[in-house]
Image (tube, rainbow, N blue to C red):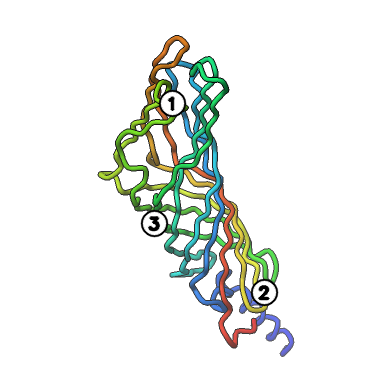
Amino acid sequence: MSVMLIVVFSTTGIAQENATDFLKDYYPIGAFIQYTNNSKGTVVKEDPTVNYGLPSYVTAQYGFVYNIYQTKRWNFKTGLILKPKALKESLNFTIEQTDANFDFPITTVLSGDDKMWSFPLIAEYIVPISNKVKWIIAPSFTISIYKDFGGSGLNSRGPSPAARMIFVNDDRSDKPLHTSAELSTGFYFPLKHIMLQPEIRYSKSFNTLKSGSYTTENYRTTPNSSTGTFKQSGDYWGFSLTVYIKKKGRNR
């Protein structure tokens, strides 16, 4: 009889244990770093011989996340993430277009002091797959604040003033907010003194990160001038790692 009672109480205790209870063994703040592969931009060209594109590019993000509330299988958290932003351009002015002695290819990353401070709102659904390892899937919504992204006005690039492209960037000064939704999946891996949380995520922007137009001037080919538009969405794939520190005296 006593053996049966022990089994019943043990089973009841396991059933009542929440999937998020393991988080209590760690400090709620985690250090966050992520490498993102930013999606290539779109370019609409009036003249298809203009060799201008916005390739994909890699940037790093870093900051911290904070676990604010847990219930059963759900962990809700927020944080502060710094996202240095950039715009990668590829151009190729050909011999025929410039009448120079060689092709003039350019690949450059425009960044300067451009950055975004992001505040994610994350809901993690946690599924235990062993005594220690937990699988998570997490939808989230992110609000980001621009700081001097791209600016506005004119700039030009080319092998010489005689053949060049003039760019007009949109003015973002009156649009300081950028919003996006993310979906991530990954695992919690508790170790002796720390806990690791690697994740793969996809971010979809709700508004354009950067856009503008360009004009070609004085090409030696026909037509010797044309216009086009460009747009960078801000979408990306990312791989992130969050590190939590274990509390002293927690030996679970």
Q: Quick check: 100 above or below 118?
A: above
> Which callout, 2 or 3, points to the residue nearer the camera?
3
> Which callout, 3 or 1, points to the residue nearer the camera?
1
* Identity, as a three-letter code, of the amino acid under mark 3: Trp
Mark before the other along the chain sequence, 2 or 1: 1
Q: Quick check: 157 above or below 172?
A: above
Mark before the other along the chain sequence, 2 or 3: 3
| Mark 3, secondary structure of its residue | strand
**Rendered-image quadrant of the N terminus:** bottom right
* Distance between mark 2 and mark 1 Cα atoms: 59 Å
Q: Quick check: 63 above or below 177?
A: below
Q: Residue furthest front?
A: 101
* Distance between mark 3 and mark 1 Cα atoms: 38 Å
**Rendered-image quadrant of the C terminus:** bottom right
Residue 251 screen position, x and y as percent: 64, 84
Residue 201 screen position, x and y as percent: 55, 50
Give the labeled residue for mark 2. 191
Give the labeled residue for mark 3. 117
Residue 95 placement, left or right of 206: right
Give the labeled residue for mark 1. 160
Residue 167 screen position, x and y as percent: 37, 30
Please rate how many residues cluster around mark 2, counting C-alpha atoms within 10 Å: few if below 14, some from 14 to 19, many from 20.
few
